[in-house]
Image (cartoon, rainbow, N blue to C red):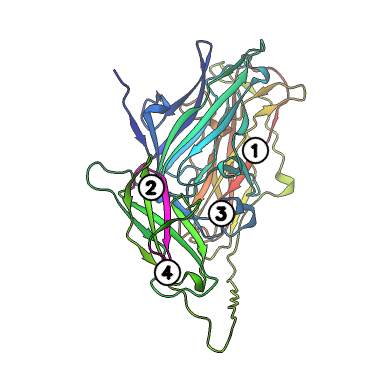
Amino acid sequence: MAADTVVLSKGHTDAIDVRYEGGALKLKVKDDTVSPAVVRDPADVTFQVLPAAETTVPDLPAFSFLGAPGSKIWMLPQVQDANLLWPGWNTGQLDAGVFAGDKVSLSLVGVDGPGDVTLFDTNSLGTPNIKFRSNDGLPDRLDVPVHTHAHAGWVFSATGAYTLKFQADATLTNGTKVSTGPVDHRFVVGDLQSGGGDLSLGISGMNEGEYQPGDAVTLQAVQSPQGPLTKYQWFSKKPAEDGFTAIEGETGASYGFTATRALNGTQYVVKLYDGEKAVATSTEVWLWVAFPPEGSSTAKTVTATIKASEGALVISVDPEDRAVALPAAELSAAGDRWESSGALKPVKVTDTRAAQPGWTASGQVADGFRTDDGKTFTGGYLGWTPSITSQGNQQGVVAGPVSHPYGTVQPHTGLGGSAVLASAPNGKGLGTAELDAALKLSVPTDTAAGTYIGTLTLTAI
């Protein structure tokens, strides 16, 4: 009997769940959107990036890898948004001592879809760190320790259906190499295509009036309803030409070019293909380009824009509070854990952005804890209970939920994954808020003795 197919669009899921079973390395999907959680085959899952994930590229140089400032993207954020899917990767089911270096390698080996795909996270200073990126060459590889649970921002540059091919590789301690091979993960960005009815295709983005010579023109193919097909071809027909001609290399959902007088009166259409068959053709749109001003053989328009201050979002820690030393761990009352408690010490988030888009501050011990002689345990064994020490009037900041250490209260994974410290909703957050958290460390009694140090990365986005 075939397994049920599902569409996951909201809640937590380990989209890349690495397992080692029966001598074979496997990629599964751990679906936490249901209780109890269900392990699924990637072939039975469609991950949906809902239309609510639409946002724009920040006007910050550090984020230029996502495209031009202000251009549309669809992002599943690194920190959980209850209204969107929160996919991550997980090696928590892998045992220590099985793989060389206690690690596996995750690779994005292929992307088939209408746009680019990028996975990135940010450090405590808000600087992005790219994990996987499709538009600068694949495969991209990421080494991941066992017992890791992590999240990143998943960014798609266009709506439509995508197939992301992930692969896990590792070397056993006896030197044997194991691999999953490429495994398809299907994503749909935007609305799912409904059954029945004819598929229509249109073009958006063409101005109704005239363009000035030198203006940028960006046309977008629009399916209705949105479906899985992503192969297009753009065509043009100038006034002196008898028919439409395919524009070489323009096979994506969008087509951009510069308006010139030579293109005045040109018509454009786009076709959608299923294999070699055109299944939909748009109606034509017309480009009109103005003449240069009279009395001038050449003309240029220079536009200067002075932006109002957009402000900034800053998370900071007093230098004297950057080191937190927990007391020596003691046996729990049940005698089954070593435990210690302490305070995070103040963390400040200052938002001076007049638009008040809201923000979320989070923390993660992604690389775990380590002793000088190489003993380790995952950052998931550290948890916290966030609190708000102070905030401005009507700032609207709320503390994040309790994140229990791994293995104490299920299904929590502590700070091994990204955990929310505090957040401000859209329309709030302007001002300075001081945050804190009660820390709790809880490790199994078989944890090797030693002094362990880990790095807690704090991020505000």
Q: Quadrant of residue 61?
A: bottom right
Mark 1: which amino acid?
Leu
Q: Is residue 78 visible?
A: no
Name the residue tied to disc 4. 240
Foreground tag (3 vs 4): 4
Question: Which residues are drawn in magenta?
Answer: 226-242
**Quadrant showing the N terminus:** top left
Instruction: Give the Cα distance between marks 3 and 2.
Output: 19 Å
Count of numbered circles in the view: 4
Marks 2 and 4, how far apart at CA: 39 Å
Which callout, 3 or 2, points at the residue further toward the start of the chain?
A: 3
Q: Which residue is mark 3?
A: 67
Q: CA distance from mark 3 to mark 1?
A: 30 Å
Q: Which mark is residue 190?
A: 2
Task: Kindly identify which numbered label has been placed on residue 270.
Answer: none
Q: Is residue 376 left or right of residue 424?
A: right
Q: Earlier in the sequence, mark 3 or mark 4?
A: 3
Q: Residues within 10 Å of mark 4 (few under 14, many from 20)?
A: few
**Type of amino acid under label 2:** Gly
User: Mark 1 — residue?
Assistant: 456
Is 23 contained in the magenta span? no
Residue 192 higher or lower than 12, as above or below: below
